[in-house]
Image: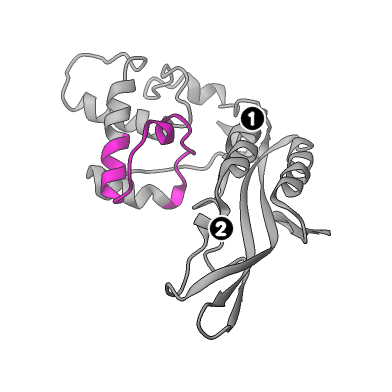
Amino acid sequence: MSIFVQGKKYETHFFYNDTQKSVIDKIKTIVSSKTKAFKANIYLDYVLVNRQTGEEMAFTEGFNTDVFKKPVFINSRADIQDRIIDYFSQEDLLSKISFPSSAWMVKKITGFQMKLYNRSHTLGAEIEIPKKIKENKYIVSNFGDTENNCVFYCLAYYLKMLEHTSKLDARFLKKDVKDLFKQFYRFKHEEFTLEKFRKTDPIDLMEFDQLEQCFKVNINSSLITSIIKEYI
């Protein structure tokens, strides 16, 4: 059974009494129909049973039941396959479940929830930057393909500029970016892997305070709206 709920900022899909494979097929159909970029997360509904007493506890979304640590950014159709379908197909869902103690075990997974958060730009399209900004002499825009690591490229460029008096070529910073990525993961006490580096999600604005603490920098961010574009 499937239920769909449309909200202002996100939509929720509920799947009950379904197998993981069946849910994957339904999720693929839903997300493949999207024309705008979005963020996604999947949550488990499940029941635990106490081996000793037979007591049962039911858990649903909101109780650390998310499959992904945080919503994943989907910017292209390739992301749909790599970051949602393949990951969800290969993941051991039982490993995502937390237990109050070793006395508890999973009785059954009762359902799945998928939340899709709306974003404004077209799926697979580059976000258009106003010409006035692109041509500003203080803007570094020749990074090439930053692979969702544009914040780390900016950090690498800034930190390298502190060491050099001559102008840097922003196209050759991948090693520096990788080193900063490792440093940030150590700061967060998380394990670094090449897979995470290759398939990382864009940095969320809520993580900027961690970046500032880790790299001892101050980061200013600005929002460009359609109204502002007309006056730039």
Report the amino acid beneath label 1: Ser
Disc nearer the start of the sequence (2/1): 2
Nearest the eye: 215 or 222: 215
In x, y percent, where is residue 196?
A: 42, 36
Query: Of 3 and 229, which appears nearest the observer?
Result: 3
The answer to whether one can see residue 218 in this image is: no
Whether pointer 2 and pointer 1 mark residues with C-beta atoms closer than 8 Å, the reply is: no
Count of number-bearing discs: 2
In the image, residue 230 lies at what x, y percent? Answer: 63, 32
Q: Which residue is mark 1?
A: 76
Dot 2 falls on a residue whose secondary structure is loop
Q: Would residue 201 be counted in the magenta stretch?
A: yes
Circle 1 — which element? loop
Looking at the rendered image, the quarter that the C terminus falls into is top right
92 left or right of 31 in image? left
Q: Is residue 140 above or below residue 36?
A: above
Question: On the image, numbered disc 2 is attached to which residue?
Answer: 66
**One can see residue 145 in this view:** yes
Identified at 31% across, 20% down, the residue is: 173
Where residue 63 sits, quadrant-wise, is bottom right
Residue nearer the viewer, 112 or 179: 112
Quarter of the image with the N terminus is bottom right
The residue sitting at 45% across, 48% down in the picture is: 205
Q: Position of residue 108 (x, y in %)?
A: 65, 66
User: Horizontal and vertical percent for residue 142?
Assistant: 42, 16
Residue at x-position 75% and y-position 34%: 35
Q: Viewed as shown, does residue 113 lie left or right of 204?
A: right
Q: Which residues are magenta?
A: 181-206
